[in-house]
Image (tube, helix red, strand yellow):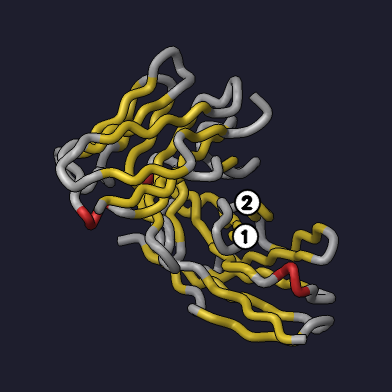
Amino acid sequence: GAGVSQSPSNKVTEKGKDVELRCDPISGHTALYWYRQSLGQGLEFLIYFQGNSAPDKSGLPSDRFSAERTGGSVSTLTIQRTQQEDSAVYLCASSGDGGAGHYGYTFGSGTRLTVV
Amino acid sequence: GQSLEQPSEVTAVEGAIVQINCTYQTSGFYGLSWYQQHDGGAPTFLSYNALDGLEETGRFSSFLSRSDSYGYLLLQELQMKDSASYFCAVTSMDSNYQLIWGAGTKLIIKP
């Protein structure tokens, strides 16, 4: 597609429920990233995919968080047994240069997750 | 470890020039990027410097000094729409060429 698409744009869920967040990157972009951002804060790295593999999962906060990418395209971030501290905006980005930064990351509009 | 420092907030006047500094401590430095993020929006890519010197793109310029581990973003002829947060980010070979992000600088522009 023309840009990075994320869905849903907003999600309100009850504490303890599971949620799935979807990211559809720019066609042909091999690198895909998930970040989390709380209000007024910087970007917290979660996970990085190169193709379908995830060389760096170091940012996942706990084992309740998992992510996968299929077909070198769409990625899903799953949060199990959500907690209130999971409330944040989840941003996905893709890059066509393997992540080196020359051409920049293109971000989606994010999913605003609210756990009540 | 890898770290970046940038001011948390900068205030400037419409029509003026403002410089946002970024210093970094990182091994395997490869390049320095700048991103802009408006409230409620997603970060958007502004510039990338791999070599020393100034890169100009319209009203925005970005500078890098590798020997000083320092860079800055220069915004000229400030407009109210430039009010946003600005993030510097380093590409590091030691982090699989992934971006390491600063905490962001909130730019407040007054009329």
Residue B16 seen anywhere in this rendered image of the structure? yes
Q: Can you tell which quarter of the image residue B79 is in?
A: bottom right
Q: Amino acid at mark 2?
A: Thr
Report the quarter where the C terminus of chain B lies.
bottom right
B94 left or right, relative to B82: left
Is residue A79 shown above or below A75? below
Q: Callout 1 environment at 10 Å: few (<14), some (14 to 19), or many (20+)?
A: many
* Badges 1 and 2, same chain: yes
Residue at (63, 85) in percent of width and height? B11
Nearer-the-camera pick, A39 or B22:
A39
Residue at image point 57% right, 44% down: A101
Q: Position of residue B104 (x, y in %)?
A: 50, 68
* Amino acid residing under circle 1: Gln
As drawn, the label of residue A71 is none
Of A106 and B53, which appears nearest the observer?
A106
The percent position of residue A50, horizontal first and vertical second, equals: 42, 26
Quarter occupied by residue B80? bottom right
> Subunit of mark 1?
B
Label 2 CA crowd tier, 10 Å (few <14, some 14–19, many 20+): some
Q: Which mark is residue B44?
A: 2
Residue extending furthest toward the top: A71
Q: Position of residue B28 (x, y in %)?
A: 43, 51
Task: Tell me how far mark 1 sits from mark 2, CA to CA.
Answer: 5 Å
Residue position marked by numbered label 1 in the rendering = B36
**Residue at x-position 45% and y-position 73%:** B5
Image position of A23 with respect to B57: above or below: above
